Amino acid sequence: MPAVDKLLLEEALQDSPQTRSLLSVFEEDAGTLTDYTNQLLQAMQRVYGAQNEMCLATHQLSKQLLAYEKQNFALGKGDEEVISTLHYFAKVVDELNVLHTELAKQLADTMILPIIQFREKDLTEVSTLKDLFGLASNDASLFLEHDLSMAKYSRLPKKKENEKVKTDVVKEVAAARRKQHLSSLQYYCALNALQDRKRVAMMEPMIGFAHGQINFFKKGAEMFSQNMNSFLSSVADMVQSIQVELEAEAEKMRASQQELLSVDESVYAPDFDVAAPQINRNLIQKAGYLNLRSKTGLVTTTWERLYFFTQGGNLMCQPRGAVAGGLIQDLDNCSVMAVDCEDRRYCFQITTPNGKSGIILQAESRKENEEWICAINNISRQIYLTDNPEAVAIKLNQTALQAVTPITSFGKKQESPCPSQNPRNVELENDKIVPKAAVHVPDADELIAPGTPIQFDIVLPATEFLDQNRGSRRINPFGETEDETFPEAEDSLLQQMFIVRFLGSMAVKTDNTTEVIYEAMRQVLAARAIHNIFRTTESHLMVTSQTLRLIDPQTQVTRANFELTSITQFAAHQENKRLVGFVVRTPESTGGEALSTYVFESNSEGEKICYAINLGKEIIEVQKDPEALAQLMLSIPLTNDGKYVLLNEQPDDGSPSENRGAESEA
């Protein structure tokens, strides 16, 4: 039996069961074609959608490449070459975007449109005709009309007188059959045409797709010419070189990591070297985590772990997660000392220049505690303002180390005259203050016995003095009896006040040279630095023609009293003019005499104090001779009332009327 590829129109009128069976095959084929066409259209629309997305994506990519130049990177390493390269790539992507846009348009015209037209025209027509054919062939009223007319036609009599009835019945049958035949012919023709149309409908969209892709690749190949290839080659070489550098750097970091991880486990302990920590005393800046004490009530406190660092003369604090640090303490001219704080170790306190207690901090180890104290002490001296702060810090600490190191020979000092001069009479010289250069420079052991203890707290602050002596008579640490009133001050020809701070005192072997004062100054300052003792107490030093008195500035109580006749040597430091010292000879209970050197720091020049002491001693010497006394007083200006010696016309910074605060730094 030959294959059937179309419906026979001649059999449409007969509408036999065989024709109906063949029609069902064509109808099944048309339904399958409709389902497949819908799925094919979805796939093609997905391709078209992807191509449209590629257009949008390449356009967005080009814009993003150009936006790299506008980014505010905190680290801009190699940005210039990256920007130029990305600009070129943006241009290439723009050209590709043009090609992708053209391809998307071509796919819409040559692939999507034909398949949609096939579905809307051919398949929809077949579906519509099928519905009409079904109505024509399956309508109950139509069948009823056809059956009734056929029943009438079948019952026609043979008599000729019924011709008119017969003609009417035949017309009814013919009309019913014509309606069915017309719908069948249209439906059969559409099904037959669909078999030929479907082959074209499947090929035409793919031809358009293939032509679009070929055109895209052809233009793309023309765009990526030899110039583009050379550019890509240079960029690839640059990336390769960067990759080599990255690998080398990564290898270096891996080696550093292994080296850092190979250390002893003890370094992770906060205080692993507590026995003998390696302390750097030359620091002029320091950073690290400390615990800050804060008061939460009258007796309760809390500790907060924060990151601290020094910046110039300021101590900064930066909480974890904060962008920047804030000022917490000005370190210029402040003092710092280790303190005992409840049950916590390694605590130290920073005190402001006016003597007020500042913040209390806790370090995690002995090493960190001492390094913070040394660093703050160096900063408080304003070493960071010098041209070479590291060298200055090293020099100061070397001096401190020498103070606790046995010295076999006393280094020669540069001998420069340090005259104590009257500002009104520059020709007056004091041979006792500035001795002639001696031929023999004594060793340190000849001046001060090795291991001699140094007293730092012989002058107590006013508050401690009142607490310790409340309700009882004060015992003078210098062995002098307390006398709140000094009648001789009323009759004294000399009365000059200076602001000083006691640094320390120590026993000495001799008072024959001022070198003993210089050596005592060196050892006192060095010992303060070694033991981190930076807090001092301010006093008023009154020089009269009989005595040298230390007065508490707050209570006006005399702390110490020295007879000028017991002072055998006095001198100011040769380099730091604010340092002054004197040697006192006092009798002992055993019948001998003891020599002690006292070191002070003054707000004014130490030479002025030395000049006042020397003038007082001269007044003592000439008091028995009225003519010599009168001659001496004629050469020295007096106050307006003619009662006291006027050392300066303008009050210096040592005037007792100035309130410099109760405490300062040595």
Image (cartoon, rainbow, N blue to C red):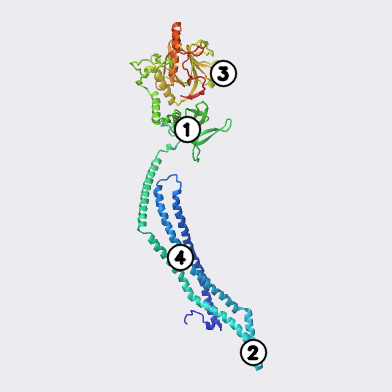
Q: Amino acid at mark 3?
A: Arg
Sooner in the amino-acid sequence: mark 1 or mark 2: 2
User: Which comes sooner in the sequence, label 1 or label 4?
Assistant: 4
Indicate which disc, 3 or 4, sits on the residue closer to the N terminus.
Answer: 4
In this view, the mark in front (1 or 4):
4
Residue under numbered circle 2: 166
Q: Secondary structure at mark 1?
A: strand
Q: Residues within 10 Å of mark 4 (few under 14, many from 20)?
A: many
Q: Secondary structure at mark 2?
A: helix
- Looking at the image, which residue is at 56% across and 83% down? 13
In the depicted view, which residue is nearer to us: 365 or 290? 290
Q: CA distance from mark 3 to mark 4?
A: 107 Å
Depth check, mark 3 against mark 2: the one in front is: 2
Considering only vertical position in the picture, is 121 above or below 91?
A: below
Q: In the image shown, does 622 or 260 lie closer to the viewer?
A: 622
Q: Which residue is mark 3?
A: 470
Q: Nearer the viewer, mark 2 or mark 4?
A: 4
Question: What residue did someone put label 1 on?
Answer: 314
Asked if the residue at tag 2 contacts the one at tag 1, i.e. Cβ–Cβ closer than 8 Å, the answer is no
Choose top left, top right, bottom left or bottom right for residue 619.
top left
Residue 586 visible, this angle? no
Q: x, y percentage for residue 336?
A: 48, 28
